[in-house]
Image (tube, rainbow, N blue to C red):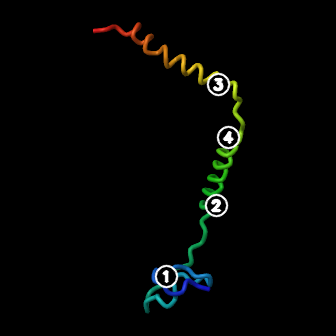
Amino acid sequence: MGLGVGLGAELGLASELGSYPDPSRILPGAQRQPTPTPNPTHHQVLSDGMLNYLGARKLADTPFPFPYAQLNAGFCLVILCLFPFVVAAKVPYG
C-alpha cells in the first residue's frame, strides 16, 4: 500500500516500496537522487535524547522528603519577611 494520490504522492514522498522519489515524477534526462541513508549521528542524537529523558524521569520519580520541603518553605518565608527590613537598615537613604 503506497500513499496513493494526494499530497504525499504530489510531493514525491517515499512509499512502502521504497521508491524515492516517485519514478513517474522524474523528468526525462534528470539524474536520479540516491535513496537517503540513515546518518550515524542521527542515532547518537536519539540516544542522547533518550538518556536525558531517562535522567529527567529518574529525577521526577525520586521522592522528596516532606520535612525538608517544609523546612525550605519556612526559611523562604522568613527571608521574604525580613529582607525588606534588612535592606532598609543597610542601604543609606538619600
Dot in front, 1 or 2: 1
Query: Mark 1 vs mark 2: which is more N-terminal?
Result: 1
Which amino acid lies under the numbered mark 1 shown in the image of this protein? Gly
Nearer-N-terminus badge (4/2):
2
Circle 2 packing at 10 Å, graded few (<14), some (14-19), many (20+), is few
In the structure shown, which secondary structural element does the residue marked by tag 1 occupy? loop
Above or below for 27 versus 76: below
Kind of element beneath mark 4: helix
Residue type, label 2: His
Whether the residues at callouts 4 and 2 have beta carbons within 8 Å, the answer is no
Whole-number angstrom distance, CA of label 3 to CA of label 1: 60 Å
Q: In the drawing, what numbered circle is on residue 43?
A: 2
| Distance (Cα) linking label 3 and label 2 | 43 Å
Residue 26 at x, y percent in the picture: 46, 88
Please state the horizontal and vertical placement of residue 84, each as a whole percent of the image.
43, 15
Of labels 3 and 4, earlier in sequence is: 4
Label 4 packing within 10 angstroms: few (<14), some (14-19), many (20+) = few
Q: Which of marks 4 and 1 is in front?
A: 4
Measure the C-alpha gap from mark 3 to mark 4: 19 Å
Quarter residue 71 falls in = top right
Left or right of 13? Residue 40 is: right
Mark nearest the camera among 3 and 1 is 3
Q: Which residue is drawn at 60% across and 60% down?
A: 41
Q: Distance between the residues labelled 4 and 1?
A: 44 Å
- Say which amino acid is labelled 3: Gln
Spatial separation of the CA atoms under disc 4 and disc 2 = 24 Å
Residue 12 got which mark?
1
At x 49%, y 13%, the residue is 82
Q: Residue 59 carries which label?
A: 4
- Identify the mark at residue 52; answer none if there is no mark: none
Residue found 54% across the figure and 81% down from its top: 20
Q: Nearer the viewer, residue 48 or 39?
A: 48
